[in-house]
Image: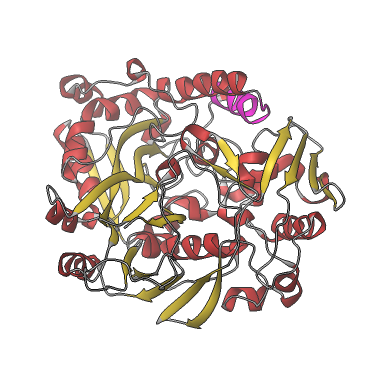
Amino acid sequence: MPRSRFLSGAVMAAATSLLASACTTGPAGGPSSGGDGSGGTVKIGVTSDVTSFDPAKGAGASDYVITSLLYQPLIGQDDGGTFVPGLADAWTSTPTKTSLTLKKGLTCSDGSALTASQVVASLKRYRATSAGALLTFGAANVGEKTTITGDDATGTVTITTAAPWGEVLAGLSGTGAGIICRTGLEAGAAALAQGAVKGAASGPYEMATAQRGASYELRLRKGFEAYPRFASMPEGKPADRLRIQISKNESTLANQLQTGALDLAPLTGTDSTRFTGNDTFTVMSAPFIRNFIAFNQRPGRPGADPKVRKAVAQAVSVDAFNNVFGGTGQTLTSYVDEKAACVSTDDSLLTRTDTAAAKQVLKGVSIKLEGSNAVAGGAGNSYVAEALRAAGAEVKLTNADNATWATHVTANQGDWDATVFPLISGALARGGTYFLGPEPANGGLNYGAVKNAAYAKNYVAATSTTDRHAKCAAWQKAQEALLKAHDVIPLATVDVRYVARKGVSFATPGGALTLSTLRITG
């Protein structure tokens, strides 16, 4: 599991900026037309540069957004975990074998045919070079234990794993598994990381010009029809060109929205309130960070005591935490939000705020609380610290920059007791890797040394099947075990608001802005 699934330094720098999209304005201030009924030109502003154009090496929001336009995955994943066609239009999947049939007539950005053999070569590279491949194919299926074959005559790609693993389709839908055409594979990692390689793109756009640190221009591929078929796909035409330029900050983006220089901007801060009730814009919210409290459960730490973990849950108020960020987030009932497939929504599993009960356990208990100040200066961490102090605990708050937080929490035998964990991933399997398996000293991601046998058993059951009913049943039991043991204390999301001017529409499958769905509607 790569660190990019939580707010690592690279991710946070890119993700807090997110995106802003703008159209070259015509007389009416809307998208410019190419003069042939096409979709015109759309400008996109970001506040951080791309770290790598290699889809297998993406480390931040800017990386994911651009590479998803250049390199199309075989399938997409919609709300609730539903899979939809991408480069493949049909598939079957069992715990040990997944077969996908490619759409007819697929091409690379140089016009050459995209064959099953090329897809196989791209997936083998992904398996060998991407940290995300561990969750795509399963830890028990690393390397040659996963067999990937293709048949050019039938256009089929087959993936066989030695051990049962039911998350292959979910992994193939991720940006990191985007298909790289032959010229990109031959060019090598260094060339892919620096910018688009001619003919390498399998997605709807190809790179036209690139000025690192300044701007990028992407050009729509004529005749591309392999867009993911998300349920909420808007009507309209895709933009002929996307111009991505580095901006300063969200306030600048909001100013440009108000002056008509921009048509779309995802905003994480208070600037989004400028557009509330404005008929010129629509505002859509989606989870950006899922916050929960996690514990260092190593011997001698207060978090090793289940009574202390429960008391911490009794000391904090989810609503009060949410109000720190303006009350615009979603209160959580698990470590992921309500859009996740198989998420538990049983609030009877949650511990209610009871300060009096918390005081009976926490009075005089010393707690080292770690938190990142990357969002709102760490105001959420400060609230948790004050709530614990109000319950009698002696709290030492480390409200550090994100890189320091990540280093402290992920270190072997880290010197911390509790942390407000900011999770980016909205999937149970991805987020759940932090609560089971080996500790960092042994190459694992179990930073708090959690030992919850019931959770681990049901995590394995959920990720080893492709049967939807069985998968969700196991996930319900897994989450129940985690919540009852207070290994996780759900808090609330920090949301991103997508502010769009009339004439630009897009979809947010699974809560994530997907620019391949952007359409100019007027």
Q: Is residue 150 above or below residue 453?
A: below
Query: Furthest-front residue in view?
Result: 36
| Residue 42 in view in this figure | yes
The magenta-colored residue range is 454-466
Query: Furthest-bottom residue in view?
Result: 211
Q: Is residue 47 above or below residue 510?
A: below
Left or right of 171 in this view: 144: right
Left or right of 149 in this view: 270: left
User: Principal SS element in the magenta part?
Assistant: helix
Task: Name which residue lies at 71% across and 37% down.
Answer: 91
Task: Name which residue lies at 21% across and 21% down.
Answer: 360
Colour pattern of the rendering = secondary structure
Left or right of 54 in this view: 379: left
Seen from the viewer's position, the closer of residues 234 and 376 is 234
Task: Name which residue lies at 64% across and 77% down.
Answer: 197
| Residue 138 in view in this figure | no
